[in-house]
Amino acid sequence: MPLTYSMPCPNCGHSAERLLTADGKLIRTQCSTCDYLLITCRTTGKVIEAYAPGIRMHALPQSVLTPLPDRSVPSH
């Protein structure tokens, strides 16, 4: 069964919903107020899907725009 709880939206601050899928692999955060959506892999932390209409790319600090190092496990 999926686990769901409320949290402040990282985009607008209103109440958002965070859901851990039944298989435990994905975390989905969504806000109905500002239409924010973020789906990440719980294991790797990689973003699967994201949508945040109120965040402007040019307003973000360079540290946010710098790509993260690859966290994948090397195959043998």
Image (spheres, rainbow, N blue to C red):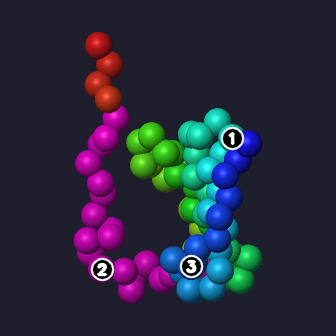
Q: Between marks 2 and 1, how big is the CA–CA gap?
A: 35 Å
Above or below residue 72? Residue 63 is: below
Q: Which residue is mark 1?
A: 22
For image coordinates 52% across by 52% down, the residue present is 40
Amino acid type indicated by mark 3? Pro
For image coordinates 29% across by 54% down, the residue present is 68
User: Which residues are drawn in magenta?
Assistant: 53-72
26 or 61: nearer the viewer: 26
Position of 76 with respect to 45 (left or right) is: left
Which element type, helix, strand or loop, lies under badge 1?
Answer: loop
- Location of the N terminus (image quadrant): top right
**Image quadrant assignment for residue 70:** top left
Looking at the image, how many numbered discs can be counted on the residues?
A: 3
70 or 14: nearer the viewer: 14
Amino acid type indicated by mark 2? Pro
Amino acid type indicated by mark 1? Ala
Q: Residues within 10 Å of mark 3 (few under 14, many from 20)?
A: few
* Spot occupied by residue 42 in the image (x, y as percentages of width and height): 49, 45
Q: Earlier in the sequence, mark 2 or mark 1?
A: 1
60 or 12: nearer the viewer: 12
Above or below residue 33? Residue 21 is: above
Residue 18 sits inside the magenta stretch: no
Which element type, helix, strand or loop, lies under badge 3?
Answer: strand
* Spot occupied by residue 62 in the image (x, y as percentages of width and height): 27, 75
Q: Which residue is mark 2?
A: 61
Residue 55 sits inside the magenta stretch: yes
Q: Which residue is mark 3?
A: 8
